[in-house]
Image (spheres, grey):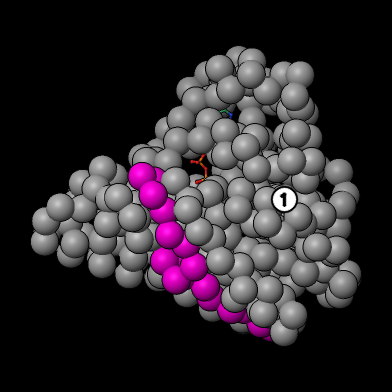
């Protein structure tokens, strides 16, 4: 789709994921919302489909209620409800921050459009996305638990939504904001010698996947490695860029195609 950018606000940036607190990171959320609004003012042709990671609002609940391997009892059923209410909270708080900047947002909960089978997407319906974009609204979804034909409910990560949108909407690019500058040769939070990988393509993908680790924070969806694996399956030529959402100016520049420190992915 022309002029469309699929954008992710990572859970590690808009929530207190590393501290494992059920709290939004309102400083980063406000900064990101304001940069997004400014970029859209400078380029009114841009369309954005936004996906939010949910950090502890998802991961901690999934571990607490044991929701990652099928739902078999009423305690787990209750856990699914609590988890989805918490994930919706992240979506609604993000929508509020964007609306304060004058943007029109359409919150689309993942459990209304996606059905999985054994944790893998079976249907992902984009009619609501297309309608919102045609109406000049910004569709917004989060990672969340969705119906699963084999397990009753299973986790659908924000990264899965990104991969589906990339595959089905064929945006001009995918931008993923997180709490580090991109993908490194090792987890930069654990290894001082980690070096930023400036570009990932079919030549170095395998080698990078071997090195990319999981998230330092609690993450049931695979952290940086899971992200890259999902992108590798679905990008099919759509360019992607992973960058640091904590650094002021990065998001606006990335949206307006200016150079920033990042990892560019071309698969
Ligand atoms: P988000 O919640 O923003 O989607 P994740 O927590 O899933 O992000 O992934 C980002 C985290 O991945 C970083 O905070 C970092 O500690 C960890 N990580 C592990 N291995 C790597 C790597 N090779 N390069 C960059 N980050 C990595």
Q: Is residue 31 above or below residue 155?
A: below
Horizontal arrangement in the rendering, residue 66 relative to residue 254 (left or right): left
- Stretch of the chain drawn in magenta: 102-119
Quarter assignment of residue 81: bottom left
Q: Which residue is mark 1?
A: 174
Horizontal arrangement in the rendering, residue 46 relative to residue 155 (left or right): right
Total marks shown come to 1
Confirm or reject: label 1 Cβ below 8 Å from ligand 1. Answer: no
Viewer-closest of 104 and 99: 104
From the top left corner, tell me how far across and down residue 255 is, in percent. 80, 57
- Was residue 145 drawn as part of the magenta stretch in this picture? no
Tell me what residue is drawn at x 53 percent, y 75 percent. Answer: 107
Q: Is residue 93 visible?
A: no
From the top left corner, tell me how far across and down residue 19 is, in percent. 37, 45
From the top left corner, tell me how far across and down residue 176 is, in percent. 65, 48
Tell me what residue is drawn at x 78 percent, y 35 percent. Answer: 266
Horizontal arrangement in the rendering, residue 237 relative to residue 118 (left or right): right
Number of other residues with Cα within 10 Å of mark 1, as a class: few under 14, some 14 to 19, many 20 or more: many
Determine whether the residue tagged by mark 1 lies in a helix, strand or loop: strand
From the top left corner, tell me how far across and down residue 40 is, in percent. 80, 71
Tell me what residue is drawn at x 55 percent, y 55 percent. Answer: 161
Return the residue found at the far left.
Answer: 74
Viewer-closest of 24 and 43: 43
Quarter assignment of residue 132: bottom right
Tell me what residue is drawn at x 87 percent, y 72 percent. Answer: 45
């Amino acid at each position: 789709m022309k002029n469309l950018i699929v954008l992710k606000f990572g859970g590690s940036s808009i929530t207190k994921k590393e501290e494992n607190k059920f709290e939004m990171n309102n400083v980063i959320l406000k900064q990101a919302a304001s940069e997004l609004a400014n970029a859209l003012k400078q380029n009114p042709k841009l369309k954005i489909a936004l996906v939010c990671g949910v950090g502890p609002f998802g991961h901690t609940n999934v571990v607490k209620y044991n929701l990652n391997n099928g739902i078999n009892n009423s305690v787990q059923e209750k856990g699914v409800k609590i988890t989805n209410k918490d994930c919706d909270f992240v979506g609604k708080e993000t929508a509020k921050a964007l609306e304060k900047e004058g943007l029109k947002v359409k919150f689309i909960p993942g459990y209304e459009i996606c059905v999985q089978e054994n944790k893998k997407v079976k249907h992902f319906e984009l009619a609501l996305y297309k309608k919102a974009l045609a109406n000049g609204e910004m569709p917004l979804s989060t990672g969340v638990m969705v119906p699963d034909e084999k397990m009753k409910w299973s986790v659908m990560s924000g990264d899965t939504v990104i991969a589906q949108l990339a595959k089905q909407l064929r945006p001009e690019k995918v931008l993923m904001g997180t709490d580090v500058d991109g993908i490194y040769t090792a987890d930069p939070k654990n290894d001082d010698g980690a070096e930023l990988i400036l570009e990932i393509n079919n030549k170095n993908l395998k080698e990078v996947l071997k090195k990319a680790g999981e998230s330092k924070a609690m993450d049931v969806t695979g952290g940086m490695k899971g992200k890259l694996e999902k992108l590798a399956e679905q990008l099919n030529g759509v360019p992607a860029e992973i960058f640091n959402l904590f650094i002021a100016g990065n998001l606006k520049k990335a949206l307006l195609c200016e150079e920033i420190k990042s990892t560019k992915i071309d698969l």
